[in-house]
Image: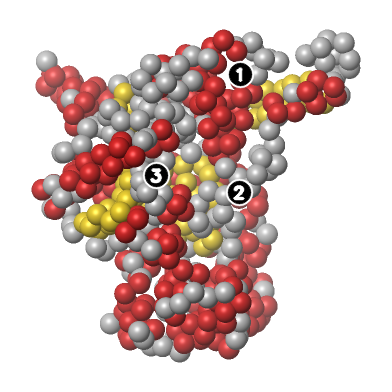
Amino acid sequence: MLCERCHERPATVHVTKIINGVQTAYHLCEVCAKEQGDVFPNPFLMGSPFDFNKLLSGLLNMESSSGFTPVTTQAQQRCGTCGMTYNQFTQIGRFGCPDCYDAFSARLEPLLRRIQNGLRHTGKVPGSAGERQQLARRLEQLRRELQQAVAQEQFERAAQLRDEIRKLEQGAQ
Amino acid sequence: MSLADFVKRTVSKWMRETGPEDDIVLTSRVRLARNLKGFPFPTLATDAHANEVMELVRQAAQNDAMKRLGKFEFIRCRDLSPLDRQMFVEKHLISPDLAQQEKHGAIVLRDDEVVSIMVNEEDHLRIQCILPGLRLQEAWNVASQVDDALEQTLTYAYHDQYGYLTACPTNVGTGIRASVMMHLPGLALTGGIQRLLTAVSQVGLAVRGIYGEGSESFGNLYQVSNQITLGESEEEIIANLMSVVQQIMEQERNARKLLMERNRIQLEDRVSRSFGILAYARKMDSRETLERLSDVRLGIDLGIIQGVSAGILKELMVLTQPACLQKFYNRELSPNERDVRRAQLIRDRLRMNDTEVHG
């Protein structure tokens, strides 16, 4: 097998990372692996105590590393509110302000997919975000439970859920 | 101050009281990360921003909704001595990071110390509820009520899609971190612990030592918590954690039963030796203290050691920490002196009647 990066030397360094069950493998030659040394951050060598943020910023750096995906221009993107660049975010693993989420959403979503369970919040909603949204969330939750009940052939429970959903939907209109 | 008075004054509700399943689950904790709309996160905050956030939280902590939930006190970190801040860390009321935030940090503390709110840590607010035993649902309910009450006067940074926005995307969405502190000596002695911990981390939960991220595990104490905060509701997150905790408890109970059936005399010897050492040693470091206390607690749970309260583990694991010791002896102690004083405190405490301390 040839090195994925230089396509010249044989790949002798094989790195497999598993994040939330998603497996990614890299095959590099020794020279490229050394050059990309910072790409495979060993959390235990990055200064103890082991810090999740450091691991996270390691992940982010890997993503923006030119060796794999040439995205250096995007790394210069700035949040219009606080002025933080995506590069800075990858260094410290924390955003500067709430608006960073929208400013960097395109880059953020692949990351969220890996470290979280989806891209949509399904939990508690602040009172100020309105009752409508709270209701929508509740309905979504009930529909999920209904699907589950049907799948598990719990028809009595499913009927109850269906009635509850109808009642909420009528109340909303 | 007498030791009895010191214990009375220092122990929080979670250390003093018992709770469901507390032969294995010492505490249940829920913390919610929240940020205020219109302010940069603490990482980028200027002095002016940080002060404004503190002032808004100070006012919110006194609003009518909060008054209905108990007696809260707002304390700025700079008004506490480094020793007092460290003591809050040892009592699990604040994080080591907040203790460092002398300039921008503050704490809102309920008088029973069940609820503590960290201000200007990684996020503007970290609302924490800690209860003895396995009471995750209740801890979430309490934290959520405090969250609602604060929201009467604060506006949170909230995104229709991403939920509650946090400085680190590992907390975004619900902002919830639910965790239980478990005492697992049976699994450690029977060698099942590593396999179990690996299995737990594969189902999206994290296992840490007792002082959180990066801390080592001593005395067979482990904190199990959720990792995922986005894409699952708080109830789902808690139900998921609960089901794993139930399974760990079952395995721990089986391991203890097995030890009693097959290795009873070795087990009795081990816990009794540890009890003897705690009761008579003249020098004890923190690590050995936790290990011996773990043995003694196991001995109490299995009926091998009698006449000592099961709460001794929770109580002494906090009171023998460096800041608590120095507070009790009322002066700075070198590590060597601490080991001597620690041994003394343990000896004295073991000779005290529980009614002297807890009335």
Camera-side residue: B117 or B128? B117
Neighbor class of circle 3 (other Cα within 10 Å; few <14, some 14-19, many 20+) is: many
Between discs 1 and 2, the one toward the N terminus:
2
Which quarter of the picture shows residue B17?
A: bottom left
**Residue at mark 3: chain:** B
**Residue at mark 2: chain:** A
Which amino acid type corresponds to the residue marked 3 in the rendered image?
Glu
B95 to the left or right of A141 = right
Camera-side residue: A68 or B358? A68
Labels 2 and 3 within one chain:
no
Q: What's the distance in space between the residues labelled 3 and 1, CA to CA?
A: 28 Å
Camera-side residue: B154 or B329? B329
Which element type, helix, strand or loop, lies under badge 3? Answer: loop
**Identity of the residue furthest to the front in this view:** B47
**What numbered label is drawn on residue A49?**
2
Q: Which residue is mark 3?
A: B121
Q: What's the distance in space between the residues labelled 1 and 2, CA to CA?
A: 25 Å
At 89% from the left edge and 15% from the top edge, which residue is drawn? Answer: A9
